[in-house]
Image (spheres, coloured by chain):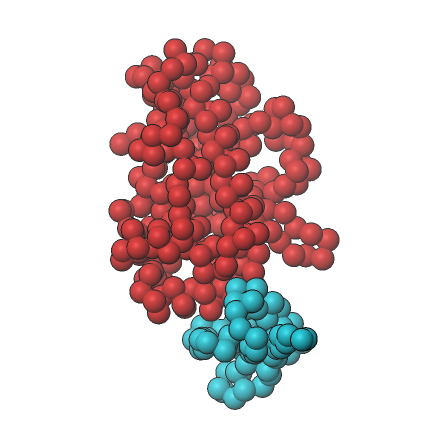
Amino acid sequence: MSNPLTMKLEQGAELQASDRARLETVVAQTRKVAPREDLIREGEIPENVRLVLDGFACRYKVLPDGKRSIVAFLLPGDFCDLHVAILGSMDHAICALTPCTIVEIPRSTIDDLTQNFPRITRALWWATLVDEGILREWLVSMGQRPSDKQLAHLICELLLRMQVVGRATENSFFLPLTQEELGDTLGISTVHVNRVLQQLREDGLIKLQGRTVTIPDVEKFKQFAEFNPNYLHLRDTKDIPVSDAG
Amino acid sequence: MHYYFDTDNDDRTSRDERGQDHADPESMRDAAIRALPDLARDDLPNGDRRVFTVKVRDESGRYVFQATLSLIATWLN
């Protein structure tokens, strides 16, 4: 099975054997990061581009009064900071939520990819645009969806994203988030997260065993969440052409 | 200290079986009150009268704190 970066980028371009071989070398050098460890802090200027190869990390910001907001989840195959070479210092921090395997990619490698691998370059653009799409959808959720649908929508999204990189079955995946972290993601109190999770369980929409989420009826759950996966721009949604760029 | 937060929106009661730790009662109080606008936001503007409640139990099962938020909507003609 190919690595999660390749699996993900296959969604954004028609990769060929030479692209896949190059991506294998990109992810060859890994290091481990412990849970709760910051991969990078706000204000730092990262030397390398980082990629999550295994585990679950998040982008977050902390306000002066200590309140935290989680603004993205980084799953296997997700870049932490693809464009730091352009932007300079980090405007947010990234923290490992579980033990993570991280790849440090020198900027020179990114330059090589963008100059010599047009299909990979296309896929990197795709990945960046999808990140923006996810952020838009989270804003919509936070502004307009009631908490139960907001949480259900997030679970639908994570199920699909985990499936893309081979980390979920058709209706189940490992969700290593505390209720506090979920609250900081959804913008609601921990007490309310607990209530909403319990409500989804009581209504038979999800099952929780430890940190594994199972969705007994995925179609019903997606309907409840009013989930439209168009913003993830995956291949089977067929909303964009994926055949060009070389 | 471990506290359990039971919530009610006048339609559905949720009994907290999991609970959460708080360093002191003030922190528990703040957490309970902070849940009220979340409860209200999800259900307003349904109905003219609604009471949103958070009741907090301590480890012995005794209720030690309660906070409510009420909606009273009235036509003025």
Q: Quadrant of residue B76?
A: bottom right
Task: Name the foreground residue: A201 vs B28.
Answer: A201
Residue occupying image coordinates x 45% and y 65%: A196
Q: Let me know if residue A63 appears in the view.
A: yes
The percent position of residue A44, horizontal first and vertical second, equals: 66, 35
Q: Quadrant of residue A216?
A: bottom left
**A232 versus B6 height, above or below:** above
Residue occupying image coordinates x 40% and y 17%: A119
Task: Name the foreground residue: B77 vs A123.
Answer: B77
Residue occupying image coordinates x 56% and y 60%: A188
For the C terminus of chain B, give its image quadrant: bottom right
Q: Colour of chain B?
A: cyan
Q: Quadrant of residue A160?
A: top left
Side of A113 relative to B31 (left or right): left
Side of B66 relative to A16 (left or right): right
The percent position of residue A98, horizontal first and vertical second, equals: 45, 49
Q: How many marks?
A: 0
The percent position of residue A94, horizontal first and vertical second, equals: 57, 42
Q: Colour of chain A?
A: red
The percent position of residue A2, horizontal first and vertical second, equals: 30, 29
For the N terminus of chain B, give its image quadrant: bottom right
Task: Name the foreground residue: A95 vs A207.
Answer: A207
**A236 versus A34 height, above or below:** above
Residue with the most extreme front position: B77
Residue with the most extreme right position: A64
